[in-house]
Amino acid sequence: MNDRPIMVDPVDGRLEPAGSRLGDFLIRLAMLLFGILQVALLLRIAFLLLGADQANVIVRDVINGTNVFVDPFRGMFKLNDVPTAPGSFLDVAAVIALIGWSIVEAIVVAILGLFDR
């Protein structure tokens, strides 16, 4: 059972448990930022797997922009790239980075949730 006091939401008048609005904001902000990173990593994986033209400005920006988030995971395994077809490959380091950053997100959200009690 939740022992928080009940308060009226000033916007729509609904009753809700009193809590740290700052804590809620920080959790949502963290989830938004990690969500953007996860989408960028998924785009990177898809672009490289489908052999997208790296001269294209969008493809180039996504790949260059995500390098900083993939590099810590590069070399973690002996298998970094799996060739699939001419001009395309599975970026294993990006897949591991996606998993790794998702775990970091879960930890950050859990820690922020501790302060929202």
Image (cartoon, grey):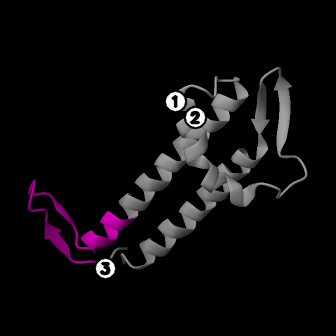
The image position of residue 7, as x and y in percent, is 15, 70
Judged from the image, the secondary structure of the residue bearing numbered disc 2 is helix
Amino acid at pointer 2: Arg
Left or right: residue 98 versus residue 109 is right
Q: Is 53 drawn above or below residue 35 in the view shown? A: above
- Residue 116 figure quarter: bottom left
Given residues 111 and 86, the one toward you in this image is 86
Q: Which residue is mark 1?
A: 57
Q: CA distance from mark 1 to mark 3?
A: 53 Å
> Does 9 lie within the magenta span?
yes
Amino acid, disc 3: Asp
The residue carrying mark 2 is: 60
Viewer-side residue, 52 vs 21: 52
Asked if the residue under mark 3 is in contact with the one under mark 1, i.e. CB atoms within 8 Å, the reply is no
- Mark earlier in primary sequence (2, 3): 3
Give the numbered dot on residue 3. 3
Q: Residues within 10 Å of mark 1 (few under 14, many from 20)?
A: few
State how far apart marks 2 and 1 are (Cα): 5 Å
Tell me which residue sits at (51%, 69%) in the image.
108
Q: Which mark is residue 73?
A: none
User: What is the span of residues highlighted in magenta in the rendered image?
Assistant: 3-26
